[in-house]
Amino acid sequence: MNSPFAPSAVTVASLDGIEWTPRFGTLPEKFFSRLAPTPLPDPYLVTANPGAFALMGLPPDAVAAPAFIDLFTGNAVPSGCHPLSAVYAGHQFGHFVPQLGDGRAITIGEAASRAAAPSGATGLHSDITLPGTGIQEVQLKGAGMTPYSRMGDGRAVLRSSIREYLCSEAMHGLGIPTTRALAITGSDQPVIRENVETAAVVTRIAPSFIRFGSFEFWYRRRDAEAVRTLADFVIDHYFPEAGAGEDRYPAFLAAVVQRTARLMAQWQSVGFMHGVMNTDNMSILGLTLDYGPFGFMEAFDPGHICNHTDEQGRYAYNMQPRIGLWNLYALGQALVPLMEPEVIEAQLRTYEATFDSAQNALLRAKLGFTVERDADHELVDEMFALMAESHADFTLFFRNLAKLRAADASGDAAVRDLVINRERFDAWVVRYRARLQSEGSMDTARATTMNRANPKYVLRNYLAEIAIRKARDERDYSEIETLRKLLSAPFDEQPENERYAALPPDWAGHLEVSCSS
């Protein structure tokens, strides 16, 4: 699988605007395998995301270029690009697997955007602003077998591709660091999962897809030099503020710890559950990476498990913050060749304070508080207990809090109707209202601020399922685009889309997602 790849006849000029520049591919070749994507027969466009085109320097009409479908299916590769799949290891559900790698993903190249590097979303959540450039790795997920496919076929299916496309864009709309989705192409080629499905390729882009497991692979092979080479590469390109010399390694780890802690707080604040937080699915840049059995909290249950495969609940909602730290300890162990264990431990100890600070700031904003009070944790704890007892809808509960008034109960119904124990709510809201009054909260200004912290729209599983069924059964891809647009502005009222903010229908309770999703 390491045979040289002969470039196709497709040229850079066929998609004007892209400048291909290798970075990861300049590492020693033991870090990856070079191989061509496996073509799909008769590919067709499912959807494309002009919102991500600028990251690659593409004009909005690039989708009309004859080469677009072939390029983003893997049926052709621009000249000068040398596709590759990376090797890594990882702890899967707590058990170390010595070799994983890109089993169905092939990076076709790295694109240096002619557009300005994105500055990131504004507000409570903010994307990582990487220094220097807007270079993006362009990865085709579902592009065929690689040396790391193990028993897999290297393909993705339409169902999972739609879910990843929509959720990565939903997270971007929320301002949470994430990989992005550029396009989905499909083919009638059958792919066997639980049932026979059709093949698809989702093009995803990110400044880097390097994972915690990328370091674990070399540490477990006792290749200290490879650990150092990879760390130097990541620092040079993504963490230059870490400086030079041996001190750069603790600074690098500290930055990863902080980014990961803040990411966990952001996930918790919107009720997002990743579902499979293995170390091979943890981005070294603090991005949300690898969308499989994800879910957004609906009926609130702190111990909710969104991944049907996760029978022990390792990655339940309330476990995510501590698993983030567990995964960082695995990364820290892999960095032992670069610094003393006590130095690593010192950086890891900053996680909890960073997470707590980020979570508290997010909760204050969600509740409409402008100042921090020592007793707030008691009010918050009682609120979550009330929500859990009633299985109140997570998104609607917080969104509707903005309708409450500080002076009277005239706006209480929007939240009160979401809970079963009305007496308990009535007791809690008296305390909440008094808390607002204590800082002179003004209803209109507070509502505006809270609505920037509490999304009205999230990618509920049933919304994704409707889009999937239309695409699969009717070849109607319009709902994918409707959801993408909706979720690009999740904090806006969008009254014309009110139905997308409703409680899930009864049939949605039977939906399950697993690692095959």
Image (cartoon, rainbow, N blue to C red):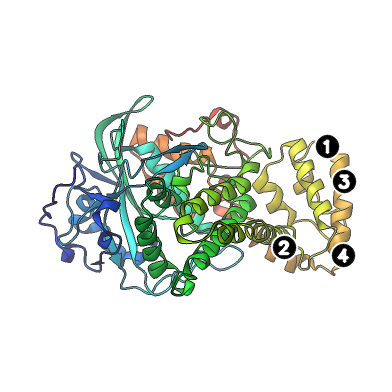
Per the image, the residue denoted by label 4 is 437
Give the label on residue 426, or none.
Answer: 3
The amino acid marked with disc number 1 is Asn
C-beta proximity under 8 Å, tags 1 and 4: no
Residue drawn at 42 percent across, 45 percent down: 164
CA gap between label 2 and label 4 equals 14 Å
The residue lying toward the viewer, choosing from 403 and 242, is 242
Please tell me which of labels 3 and 1 falls first in the chain: 1
C-beta proximity under 8 Å, tags 2 and 3: no
The amino acid marked with disc number 4 is Gln
CA gap between label 3 and label 1 equals 9 Å
In the picture provided, is 445 more to the left or to the right than 237? right
Please tell me which of labels 2 and 3 falls first in the chain: 3
- Residue 427: give x, y in percent of width and height: 89, 47
Residue drawn at 26 percent across, 43 percent down: 143
In the picture provided, is 333 more to the left or to the right than 352? left
The residue lying toward the viewer, choosing from 483 and 154, is 154
**Residue situated furthest top in the rendering:** 195
Give the label on residue 421, or none.
Answer: 1
Give the label on residue 353, or none.
Answer: none
Please tell me which of labels 1 and 4 falls first in the chain: 1
CA gap between label 1 and label 2 equals 25 Å
- Residue 296: give x, y in percent of width and height: 57, 44
